[in-house]
């Protein structure tokens, strides 16, 4: 009888841990942006000299910055391809035109205008299916999903995990 109680307990603990891990992933609603933070009016012209190497991507950055904020109230993330499974992402303060950060991603990013949360290499149902069909793919098996929050103009990591662990939260 003790064996069955132990087996039941271990099964319960393992399932609970897995459910907790999936439900404890950061969510956009946990990092809201106030209405006061939203840009009112046109975005400032981009200042290419504010970040080293930006002049190399002048056209893409200027065009992207003109689109206006798409993240955390008054920030614009401009993304473009840099090769197979590679995106170059630039964080611009639309109020000042300053480029604050540059980062790369493998399968994209997710962000919202009303949230300070940024998800790099977010879970994706189509990629999950591809991974399940070909789990030996080195790219997806080694990739990380990184959750960052923008605070005072800086991106801070709040959670990261292997992508294959995060996709378990998908249906």
Image (spheres, rainbow, N blue to C red):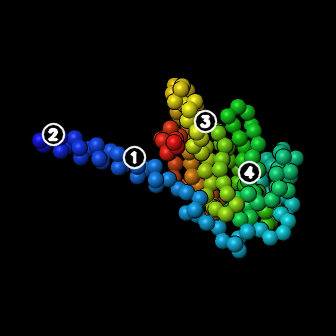
Q: CA distance from mark 1 to mark 4?
A: 34 Å
Which secondary structure, mark 2?
Answer: helix
- Is 80 above or below relative to 155? above
Question: Looking at the image, which residue is at 79% across and 47% down?
Answer: 53
Mark 1 nearby-residue class (10 Å; few <14, some 14–19, many ≥20): some
Mark 2 nearby-residue class (10 Å; few <14, some 14–19, many ≥20): few
Question: Looking at the image, which residue is at 52% across and 43% down?
Answer: 170
Q: CA distance from mark 4 to mark 2?
A: 56 Å
Q: CA distance from mark 4 to mark 3?
A: 26 Å
For this view, does 8 lie left or right of residue 127?
A: left
Q: Earlier in the sequence, mark 2 or mark 3?
A: 2
Q: CA distance from mark 2 to mark 1?
A: 23 Å
- Is 53 above or below relative to 28? above
Label 2 belongs to which residue?
3
Q: Tell me if residue 49 can be seen.
A: no
Question: Looking at the image, which residue is at 75% across and 46% down?
Answer: 79
Label 1 belongs to which residue?
18
Mark toward the viewer: 1 or 4: 1
Q: Earlier in the sequence, mark 4 or mark 3?
A: 4
């Amino acid at each position: 009888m003790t064996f069955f109680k132990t087996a039941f307990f271990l099964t319960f603990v393992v399932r609970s841990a897995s459910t907790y891990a999936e439900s404890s992933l950061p969510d956009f609603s946990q990092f809201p942006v106030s209405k006061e933070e939203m840009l009112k009016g046109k975005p400032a012209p981009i200042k290419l000299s504010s970040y080293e190497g930006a002049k190399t991507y002048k056209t893409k950055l200027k065009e992207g910055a003109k689109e206006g904020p798409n993240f955390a109230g008054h920030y614009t993330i401009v993304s473009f391809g840099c090769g197979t499974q590679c995106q170059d992402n630039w964080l611009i303060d639309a109020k000042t035109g300053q480029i604050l950060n540059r980062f790369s991603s493998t399968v994209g990013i997710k962000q919202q205008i009303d949230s300070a949360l940024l998800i790099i290499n977010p879970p994706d149902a189509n990629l999950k299916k591809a991974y399940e069909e070909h789990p030996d793919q080195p790219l997806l098996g080694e990739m990380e999903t990184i959750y960052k929050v923008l605070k005072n103009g800086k991106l801070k990591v709040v959670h990261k995990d292997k992508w294959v662990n995060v996709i378990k939260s998908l249906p």
